[in-house]
Amino acid sequence: MPPSSAATTPASVRQWRLSTRLVRGVIGVVIGCLAIVVLLTGAFTKFEITERLDDSLQEVAERLQFAVLVLNQQGSGHDVAHLSNIMPTSLAYQITDAQGHVLLRSSNAPESGFVTPPQAGFFMQHRFRVYVTPAAQPDRFIMVGEPRVHRAQATHHAILIAVLPILGAIPCIWLLVVWIVRRSLRPLVRLQGEIRERGGGNLNPVPQLDLPVELSTIQAAVNLLLERLHKALAAERAFAGNAAHELRNPIAALLAQAQMLRGQLARQASTATLPLPVNTMAKIAPATLPADALSPAGTGTGTGTGTGTGTGVMPQTALSASEKAEQTAVEDATYRLDAMISQIQRLSRIVEKLLQLSRAVAGTGFRRDKFDLLPVLHVMADELDRPQNSNNPRLMLETGCCTHLSVRGDMDATGILLRNVLENALRHSPPDSPVRVSLALADSPMGKDIISRTQAQGATGSCLATLRQQPEMANAVILTVENASPALPDATLSKLTDPFVRGGSQAEGSGLGLAIARTIARHMNVPMQLASPIPGQKDGFMVQLIFPQDAA
């Protein structure tokens, strides 16, 4: 059965999509792994860049050995080598003695020694990374310093070059993961579409699809479930049909026998109390007749032989005790037969409602045939409010300018649905009050007027939400049935569609009409809402049905 407009998922259960969860999970794992790779790559790149730059400091220090020889030839002093194109990021060097006195330095090197006293090795100063090595000449040290700014820039550039391709690959990986996940879930989407089409009148097995092993088992289980459901529904429908045949015939025969007996008693009672004709009395011996047996108004002629003809009516004589007892017994039997006939008729109606409920539960509204709703409504209205009552009709139909309204569903089930709704309105409203039945399209002026009148009513809120949330319901057919009645409490109104629940009315009924209507409406995917009082009024009862119109 297709899902109804109402939400079938509890509000506490959070809905989620498998594709979204798979994409997020895979992307999260991939990004986590890439983050670890980026960190390791950055650390390794920093280590390698440090090694390379330290090697360059050692190479520069070896090349400065000749400067020590030149310094020894020129004599010791505090000289400064002025070179062109000296940048803040250029290497600086110093040649010192064993006490750390600077003998020769570059223009960008500090006047004091990098390391005092000189010691061989690498040192991290505030502004420089310094390499110190003894010169070939005794008591001389060569110090080469690299600005830390240059080292940091070189390290950052190297790390960025190494990491940037990895970071740039993340969007490509995301697109690939989304494509792979969606492609992998296509069989599941096809299976979902096939299962969604099942229900209603379509209980055919799911056809063979190109599914993986994990989904093939689900397809087999669904087909097995559909087969069992088809058999169960067929059995319930067969039971409803057989029960209708087996129960209606005995009840109809019992009712016919009771009515025949009632007619026979009525004829017997009327025969016992009618006056006898005079020609019948003349055949009775005169000796047996009382002196005042003949009517004073009677006239007649006769002969001495005791035969003759005459006209007139003998008046009814006083009943004897036995005759009175017999008449009383007849009247009592007539009363009991009337009560029996009434109960048999009530039993017949209850059995009819139970059979309708059984058919509704068994899925009588699952079919999705195209039919016109207007003739069905007119047939039900004529059957419940006979045309001979045209002088004072109770059902007031308002269809506007609609000449036909094509909907999809089961015509017989729709007839049962409308019959129960109209019967409920007629039975539980005052005898002389009209029942207003309006039928209109949701996007027509009449339909918009109905929506505007019910918009402020909380009980019909879900119907209006259906019209707003489902675009295909924009041209739906709205059927509204309104009848006069006292306003019902909310607690009673909410349970009124349960079987054998009545609204407190004294009218004769079984409490099954609205239950049957709600069951069929759910099977037909027709939103049905109840309201009491009628929106905009202080009393009354309203049933509203929204039929999806067939646009084809």
Image (cartoon, rainbow, N blue to C red):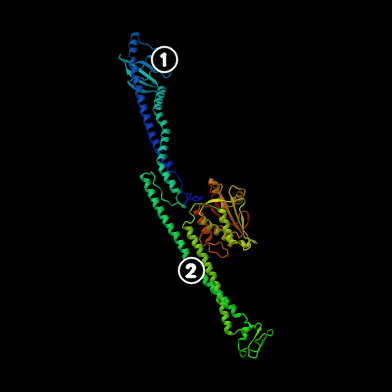
Q: Position of residue 199 (x, y in %)?
A: 45, 51
Mark 1, residue position: 107
Q: Callout 1: few (<14), some (14-19), or many (20+) C-alpha neighbours within 10 Å?
A: some
Q: Is residue 172 above or below residue 246?
A: above
The furthest residue to the right: 297
Q: Which residue is found at the position 63% from the left and 82% from the top?
A: 277
Pick the residue in front: 444 or 103. Answer: 444
Q: For the residue marked with disc 2, what is the amino acid?
A: Pro
Q: On the rendered structure, is 68 left or right of 540?
A: left
Q: For the residue marked with disc 1, what is the amino acid?
A: Ser
Residue 250 shows which numbered tag?
2
Pick the residue in front: 399 or 1. Answer: 399
The mark closer to the camera, 2 or 1, is 2
Residue 323 shows which numbered tag?
none
Q: Position of residue 97 (x, y in %)?
A: 34, 15
Q: Is residue 427 above or below residue 186?
A: below
